[in-house]
């Protein structure tokens, strides 16, 4: 069982209520020609599928297979924002996000921050994008786990 990228692109069009493949390409930040080439070759960079899923709050499983729940669980927090949480939740996109105070890091934490930076700066874009989304997911899960305790 292989992945049909033309079906994935069709699901992207449908889920995003996009008029044509050119609109999908604009949403993904690629040229229409690049998207057409992905369709013809039957392959697409993983980070584009992850990006689209995050933009619209879609389940990656649904986007790839067409089966299961269309939207991610817990989508409510991000629904309607229409942007990537990992890459675009920055001051450049109108939000004043201040970096954490790194002077309070322990030596072990500094080592792991360095390792994380090495992965994020690697030439393999798919790996770095996947890592960004994973870190964001872990952060959201951590914050969600702390939230009920704060309410008590």
Image: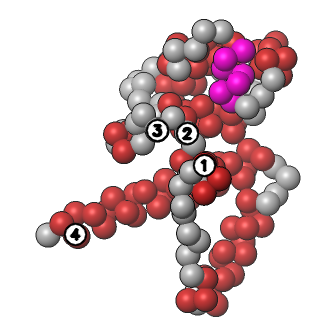
Give me the disc on residue 81: 3
Q: Is residue 61 magenta?
A: no
Counting residues from the start of the chain, the first of labels 4 and 1 encountered is: 1
Image quadrant where residue 53 sits: top right
Label disc, if present, on residue 83 of the rendered structure? 2
Left or right of residue 93, residue 77 in this image:
left
Q: Nearer the viewer, residue 12 or 83?
A: 83
- On the image, the x and y values in percent for residue 136 come to 53, 55
Q: Earlier in the sequence, mark 1 or mark 2?
A: 2
Q: Position of residue 140 (x, y in %)?
A: 43, 57
In the image, which is nearer the foreground, mark 1 or mark 2?
A: 1
For the residues labelled 1 and 3, the Cα–Cα distance comes to 12 Å
Q: Label 3 near label 4: C-beta < 8 Å?
A: no
First-in-chain label (1 vs 3): 3
Distance between the alpha carbons at the discs numbered 4 and 3: 27 Å
Query: Gap between marks 1 and 2, in whole Å?
Result: 9 Å
Q: CA distance from mark 2 to mark 3?
A: 6 Å
Residue located 53% across and 55% down the image: 95
Q: Give the residue at mark 1.
A: 93
Residue 35 position in % (x across, y down): 77, 20
Instruction: Please rate how many residues cluster around mark 1, counting C-alpha atoms within 10 Å: few if below 14, some from 14 to 19, many from 20.
Output: few
Q: Which residues are magenta?
A: 22-28
Mark 4 or 2, nearer chain start: 2
- Mark 4 and mark 1: span between their CA atoms? 31 Å
Please say if 68 is above or below 13: below
The answer to which of marks 4 and 3 sits earlier in the sequence is 3
Mark 4 vs mark 2, CA separation in Å: 29 Å
Local crowd size for mark 2, using a 10 Å CA cut-off: few (<14), some (14–19), many (≥20): some
Question: In the rendered image, which residue does mark 4 sit on?
Answer: 149
141 with respect to 65 (left or right): left
- Name the secondary structure under disc 3: loop
């Amino acid at each position: 069982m292989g992945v049909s990228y033309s079906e994935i692109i069709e699901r992207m069009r449908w889920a995003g209520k996009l008029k044509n493949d050119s609109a999908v390409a604009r949403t993904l930040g690629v040229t229409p020609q690049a998207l057409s080439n992905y369709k013809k070759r039957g392959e697409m960079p993983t980070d584009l599928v992850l990006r689209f899923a995050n933009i619209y709050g879609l389940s990656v499983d649904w986007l790839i297979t067409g089966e299961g729940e269309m939207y991610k669980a817990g989508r409510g927090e991000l629904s309607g924002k229409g942007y990537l949480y990992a890459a675009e939740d920055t001051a450049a996109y109108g939000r004043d996000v201040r970096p954490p105070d790194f002077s309070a890091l322990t030596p072990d934490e500094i080592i792991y921050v360095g390792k994380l930076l090495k992965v994020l700066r690697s030439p393999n874009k798919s790996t770095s994008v996947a890592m960004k989304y994973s870190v964001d997911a872990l952060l959201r899960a951590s914050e969600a786990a702390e939230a009920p305790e704060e309410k008590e």
